[in-house]
Image (cartoon, coloured by chain):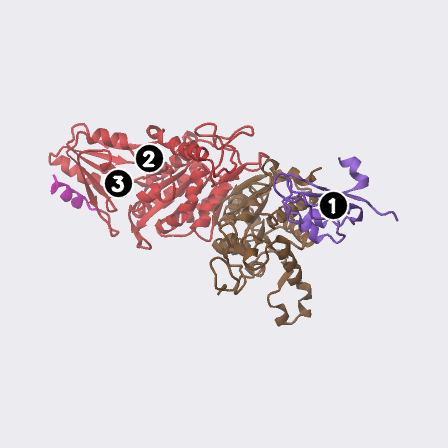
Chain colours: A purple, B brown, C red
Amino acid sequence: MAKKDYQIYIDQRLCKGCDICVELCGKSVFTVSDKINQKGYYVPVPVNASDCSGCMICELICPEMAVVVVETETIGETA
Amino acid sequence: MQHHLLKYLRTELLPTAFCTGCGCGTVLNLFCHAIDELKLDPDDIISVTGIGCSSWIPSPYFAGDTLHTTHGRSIAFATGVKVMKPEKKVVVIAGDGDLSGIGGNHLIHAARRNIDITVLLVNNYVYGMTGGQVSPATPYETSTTTTPYGNPEHPFEIAELVAAAGSVYSARWTTYHIFHLKKAIKEAMNKKGFAFIEIFSQCPTSYGRRVGLREGIDILKEFKKNSVNIKNLKKFTEEELENKIVVGKMIERSRPEFVESLQDVNKKVMEET
Amino acid sequence: MKFVQGDEAAAYGAIFAGCNFFAGYPITPASEVAELMSLELPKVDGYYIQMEDEIASMGAVIGSVWAGGKSMTATSGPGFSLMQENIGYACMTETPCVVVNVQRSGPSTGQATKGAQGDVMQARWGTHGDHEMIALAPNSIQETFDTLIEAFNLSEIYRNPVMVMTDGEIGHIREKLVFPDPEELEIIPRRLAEEKIDIFGGERIPPMIEFGMGSQVHVTGSTHKSNGMRDVSTQSVHDELVRRIYEKIDSNRENIVRYKTEFIDDAEYLIVSYGASSRPAYGALENLRKSGLKIGFLRLITLWPFADRIISETGKNMKKIFVPEMNLGQISREIERFVTCKVIPVSKIGGIPHTISEIETKIRSNL
């Protein structure tokens, strides 16, 4: 069975750097950024997106609706 | 790329005014997911809120008709809305202080009447917006800005209280239990009658910092550690259950709904006269 | 025609005005309004709901209005006190609605079954912050009925709550009530915007948009911009909003204020009264005129906004003004602001209305 691939987007305008996604991701997809963004927040980076299992925890729990998880095959249809 | 559910929000007002790591945004996020999965038209949802941080979840962010009322009175206002617009979904989102403190009487009476509204009570243990004073939901002996020597009072078990008052649906989840909570919101929105969910939610700013849980994630981890599903209660001794958060569905049942009862009366009276 | 109490006349007036929603809580001497509304509203497909307290009642009334209702509540002093916060919310959100206050002796529980006029200033200033208020005081059963219709009309014209200040006397006495032909009544419908526009500004009295039209209406008691969205930090936004909700009534005083005058052309003295106390006051006036005293009569039907023009105009020619009222001088002191002559309160409290001779004696001994 082919493994599904996911792309993870973090909305730079919305993220406040609470790192809840970083902490709760079971696959350690995110890493804490060392770069501060325009608004003064350290926005996480999905460095290991290839490990994403598509569980959706990060998207659902994000308090800013800043995280979006998209199945790679469907990108063409929704984007 | 932005979140496809931002279409439900007044996006010009984003990012939210919530503190970093606050659970209010998670409730908003899950509410939008629930609405989307239920395929509800936001024009058919009327949000009614009170005063406090969690009242800001729909007001101003959720892009539908919104009535942001006085402190504690959202359910009373919502009662008037629902009676005159029974075809709409009326949702109240407000906090523990608002709905179980100053507005506690309206909460239990609306449950007793069984009026068809959905209430999401976001319980962050304190009056967050005013700086973290003790609320009717603050745990015993907890230090807050107005209980500097520890809370001498005991908290309400709000979901059980509302179930006892007569609601047809009452559940408790936390912002850690995202899948359960999303499902519960969908069930509550679909339930005919007074449907209630108590949502334990993290307030890192006004609660967490006084109890050594400075980040939102710290409180979420506590929720995970301290929650016991109501289905598993028998596995624990009373002692073990002390200070645990009992999550799950407290009650689900059917009773005649208030506005329908009023409509039945009108129909009967108008036929007679 | 019917022989009814003032409370019942208030309920019938509301039904004739098109009221279709009542939320209330029992209280003496206003309970009969609620009782009759619970009987009559279902006949016109309206809704009576009894709430858990007066705070909830006022809240439900406001909620129902935004959902399309034409709504009222009725109460007395203690309940009126509880309603004040939400009455302020109705002012700030420009929600048309009617509150009947069948006044009783206060403060606090006072004399629950006894009439009084002690809430006159509370009607004006009971809720916090700058605002204007419309308050009417009928003095008969027929006028109570008519006043309810006028109250609903004024609330729709000015998008403001309107207080109908009856009292335990007017509320409970029985007189004949002649029902008008509904066809001939002038009922002002709610002004609704036809498209999505700003409903909290743009013009002095903007139209409303009710919930459920897909317009994403945002209603808040916080300071808000003309589109309804909260802005609690910009000085000019608050200034513009609060001045507008004040001026929309203040600038229309002449269109709102109603009163009745008699014998003022030759008068050297004047009686000003309203509501229940205006009835024995008028008896006293008749006796005093018969005995040759040049005394005139001014009955306030509108308490707020205050009838300042007629008071100052007629007051110019008077040696003294006497003000019978069932409180310790609430309107009397208001009159003093607009006249230079002496204003003498003819106060009576304790639950028994003035007698004609009491008022007559007080006036004679102070000429």
**Disc 2 sits on a residue from what chain?**
C
Question: Magenta part of the protein: which range?
Answer: C354-367
Q: Helix, strand, or loop for circle 1? A: loop
Tag 3: amino acid:
Ile
Distance Cα–Cα, label 2 vs label 1: 64 Å
Is C64 covered by the magenta stretch?
no
Circles 2, 3 touching at the beta carbon (< 8 Å):
no
Image vertical order of residue C265 relative to residue C10, above or below: above
The residue carrying mark 3 is C331
The residue carrying mark 2 is C305
Residue C218 appearing in the image:
yes
Q: Quadrant of residue B2?
A: top right
Counting from the top left corner in percent of width and height, residue B108 is at 52, 56
**Disc 1 sits on a residue from what chain?**
A
The residue carrying mark 1 is A46
Distance Cα–Cα, label 1 vs label 3: 72 Å
Circles 2, 1 touching at the beta carbon (< 8 Å):
no
